């Protein structure tokens, strides 16, 4: 027991932790978390070439604008009336299908294949920060440690660390919400009603981070809560956006980083 405790204590020290990581890398070289064939731990170029992004995303909701652009400023018909509540704008890094859907699925399933870290790093590298503090869509209340790292939390931490922004955990969920992309449109509003509580006073300027953007109901509910707690400028960044495959508008491109917006 003492030996195990000693090893654990030793690994808290940075040089030992680095040495342990280097040794593990020699014994078990990390692989691309998507194909598990190319060297890792980052997503390999071949897999990145399959990462689909939205062409001309609506700056308010990240949906493909396609040929539907007819308003000034340029926004999609859906956002012409409402947008995503108090969210001023959304950046999405890809389309929820193919390689990105696989990585997010692995990350959310708790697969220990480096998907969480690779996605968090991708967000930190690709995100455009308007101005704000960083905050997150928080953990569901009954989430267990065995489920592995929480994807949105890992992304928020990576963004905060990379861009040297404060991380403010201002939200908590009151219950576990159903996965939005599994719900019908009319069920989504109901699923997020009173879902969030603010834990303390919040910054005036906030960046919300989440994994999948479907209808925007979750972001809108979080933004409403933050607004009531004092936030005035709320932005969002999501790893992936659900895009309806029956949508006739031209939607996606492969291998191109997401276009940041102001
Ligand atoms: Zn790969
Ligand atoms: Zn829109």
Image (tube, grey):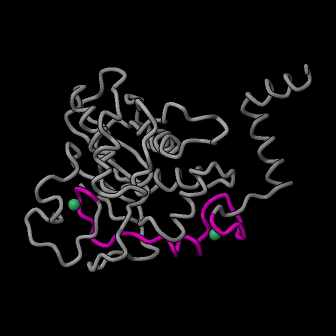
Q: Is residue 168 visible?
A: no
Q: Position of residue 191 (x, y in %)?
A: 35, 43
Asked whether the viewer can see residue 57, the reply is yes
Within the displayed image, which quadrant is ligand 2 positioned in?
Answer: bottom left
Classify residue 226 as left or right of residue 8: left
Residue in view at x 80 percent, y 27 percent: 8
x then y, percent, for residue 18: 75, 40
Write the start and end of the magenta stretch as one range: 34-61
Coordinates of residue 109 in the picture (x, y in percent): 61, 51
* Quadrant (top left/top right/bottom left/bottom right) for the N terminus: top right
Q: Nearer the viewer, residue 182 or 208?
A: 182
Q: Magenta stretch: residue 59 in it?
A: yes
The one of 22 and 201 positioned closer to us in this rendering: 201
In this picture, residue 118 sits left or right of residue 74: right
Q: Can you say whether 151 is above or below 53 in the image?
A: above
Q: Is residue 248 left or right of residue 45?
A: left
**Residue 171: horizontal and vertical position, in percent?**
38, 30
Main structural element of the magenta stretch: helix, strand or loop? loop
Residue 180, compared with residue 194, is above or below; it is below
Q: Say which quarter of the image contains residue 142.
A: top right
Q: Is residue 6 above or below residue 34?
A: above
Quarter of the rendering containing residue 160: top left
Is residue 90 magenta-colored? no
> How many discs mark residues in the rendered view?
0
In the image, what residue occupies the spot 52% across and 75% down?
49
Task: Look at 85% across and 28% down and name the residue there.
Answer: 7
The image quadrant where one finds the C terminus is bottom left
Quick one: 98 or 45, which is closer to the camera? 98
Residue 77: quarter of image: bottom left
């Amino acid at each position: 027991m003492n030996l195990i405790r000693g090893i654990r204590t030793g690994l808290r020290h940075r040089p030992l932790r680095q040495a342990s990581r280097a040794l593990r890398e020699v014994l078990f070289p990390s692989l691309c978390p998507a194909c598990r064939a190319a060297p890792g731990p980052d997503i390999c170029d071949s897999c990145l070439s399959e990462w689909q992004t939205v062409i001309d995303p609506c700056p308010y909701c990240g949906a493909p604008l396609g040929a539907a652009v007819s308003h000034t400023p340029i926004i999609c018909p859906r956002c012409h009336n409402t947008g995503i509540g108090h969210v001023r704008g959304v950046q999405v890094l890809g389309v929820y299908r193919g390689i990105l859907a696989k990585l997010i699925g692995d990350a959310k399933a708790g697969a220990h294949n480096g998907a969480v870290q690779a996605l968090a790093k991708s967000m930190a590298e690709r995100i455009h920060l308007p101005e704000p503090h960083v905050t997150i869509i928080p953990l569901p209340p009954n989430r267990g440690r065995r489920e592995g790292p929480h994807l949105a939390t890992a992304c928020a931490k990576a963004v905060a660390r990379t861009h040297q922004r404060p991380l403010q955990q201002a939200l908590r969920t009151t219950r576990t919400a159903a996965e939005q992309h599994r719900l019908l449109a009319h069920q989504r509003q109901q699923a997020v009603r009173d879902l969030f509580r603010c834990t303390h006073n919040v910054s005036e300027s906030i960046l919300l981070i989440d994994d999948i953007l479907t209808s925007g109901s979750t972001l809108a509910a979080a933004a409403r809560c933050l607004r009531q707690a004092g936030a005035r400028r709320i932005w969002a960044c999501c790893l992936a956006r659900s895009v309806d495959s029956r949508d006739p508008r031209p939607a996606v491109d492969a291998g191109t980083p997401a276009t940041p917006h102001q």
